[in-house]
Amino acid sequence: MNLLPVSLGEIKISRKNDEVLVCYGLGSCIAVCLYDKVNRIGGMFHCVLPASNGRRDDPKYADIGVKVLLEKMFEAGAYRTTMTAKIAGGACVLKLSTMDFDIGSKNIKAVIGHLQDNCIAISGKEVGGSISRTVKLSVSTGAVSVKSAFGREIELC
C-alpha cells in the first residue's frame, strides 16, 4: 500500500490500485473524496475555505476546488454517472462566544452545495463536531475510512 498525502488545498487523482489518498489531521477542512466505481479512479481534494470571493485559480476554496477535482476526474476517464462522493471533516475547532469562527460548518455547506450543483451524489459523510480527523480513500475499492483524533475509526458507507 502506497500512501499519497493530500495537503492543504491540494487535489490528487489516482488509478493505481496500490495507492491510498490521505488527508491528515483535518480540523475545519474537508476531505472531498470522489470515486468512479466502474473505472476505479479515485480523487481527493483538501478543502480549506468555503469561498474564493473572486480569487482565481486557487483550489483551496470549495467553489474552485470541487470544480477542478471534477475536471481532473473527467480527464482521467471518470464519468459523472458512475461517480460518488464521500466527505469528512468540517469540525468547529475554535469556539468564541463573541465571534463566528465556525469555518467548518461553512465548509460543509459549501462543499455539499457545489457537489449537488454538479449532480454528484454524496454516499457517505462524517462531518461537524469538534474533533479532528484523518481520511483515507483506497483507490482499489473506493473505501473511505475516517479516524478521529481519539482513535475511533469508521468506514463511510
Image (cartoon, rainbow, N blue to C red):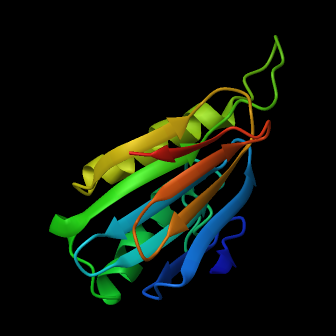
Q: In this view, does 2 lie above or below 113?
A: below
Where's residue 65, x and y in %?
A: 50, 65
Name the residue located 47 percent from the left edge and 43 percent from the top edge.
Answer: 110
Q: Is residue 13 left or right of residue 112?
A: right
On the question of residue 71 being in view, the answer is: yes
User: Which residue occupies the foreground of this view, 80 or 57?
Assistant: 80
- Which quadrant of the structure image shows residue 34? bottom left
The outermost residue toward the top is: 97
User: Which residue occupies the foreground of this view, 15 or 114?
Assistant: 15
How many numbered marks are there?
A: 0
Quadrant the N terminus occupies: bottom right
Q: Is residue 13 left or right of residue 6?
A: left
User: Which residue occupies the foreground of this view, 97 or 45?
Assistant: 45
On the question of residue 53 being in view, the answer is: no
Q: In this view, does 134 lie above or below 152?
A: below
Name the residue located 26 percent from the left edge and 57 percent from the top edge.
Answer: 118
Q: In this view, does 54 lie above or below 59?
A: above
Q: Is residue 102 left or right of residue 74?
A: right
Where's residue 116, x and y in %?
A: 28, 47
Name the residue located 37 percent from the left edge and 55 percent from the top edge.
Answer: 85
Where's residue 135, x and y in %?
A: 62, 55
- Which quadrant of the structure image shows residue 73? bottom left
Q: In this view, does 21 lie above or below 117?
A: below
The outermost residue toward the left is: 81
Where's residue 9, x and y in %?
A: 65, 66
User: Which residue occupies the foreground of this view, 133 or 97?
Assistant: 133
Quadrant the C terminus occupies: top left
Name the residue located 57 percent from the left edge and 35 percent from the top edge.
Answer: 106
- Which quadrant of the structure image shows residue 97? top right
